[in-house]
Image (cartoon, grey):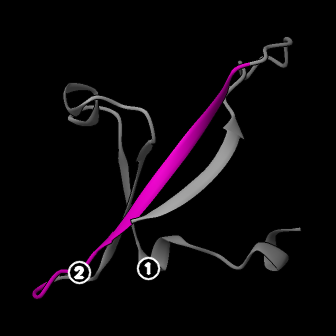
Amino acid sequence: MSHGNEIDTGPADGSPDDCTLELDHVTVENDDAPDECAVFPREASEEELMNCWIVAQEHSFVDLESMR
């Protein structure tokens, strides 16, 4: 498992907030489906991990430069 990055999790309304969240990720290799990247909070407990994660498949990602 490799470590993710700190991201700003401040409120969407733009008000100031010093909240950051460190994320980890792992690649899930599936035999009968596309591989997936699971992203989750680094410091989450096992209980929190049951609800605090997101999974993306290869076609869900775009090149960073193409979005700038």
Region of the chain picked out in magenta, as a range:
19-32
Task: Tell me the residue at 29%/80% (across/down).
Answer: 35
Task: Tell me the residue at 18%/82% (across/down).
Answer: 33
Q: What main secondary structure does the magenta stretch of the protein show?
A: strand
Element type at mark 2: loop
Q: Is residue 10 above or below residue 31?
A: above
Q: Quadrant of residue 34?
A: bottom left
Residue most toward the left?
32
Q: Distance between the residues labelled 1 and 2?
A: 11 Å
Mark 1 or 2, nearer chain start = 2
Q: In this view, does 24 lie above or below 49?
A: below
Q: In which quarter of the image is residue 6?
A: top right
Number of the label disc, if any, that sits on residue 29 = 2
> The C terminus appears in which quarter of the rendering?
bottom right
Amino acid at pointer 2: Glu
- Residue matched to label 1: 58
On screen, residue 65 versus residue 38, left or right, reads: right
Q: Mark 1, mark 2: which one is toward the viewer? A: 2
Asked if residue 28 lies in the magenta stretch, the reply is yes
Task: Tell me the residue at 53%/46% (across/down).
Answer: 23
Binning the other alpha carbons within 10 Å of mark 2 as few (below 14), some (14 to 19) or many (20 upward) gives: few
What count of labels does the image hold? Answer: 2
Task: Tell me the residue at 34%/34% (across/down).
Answer: 52
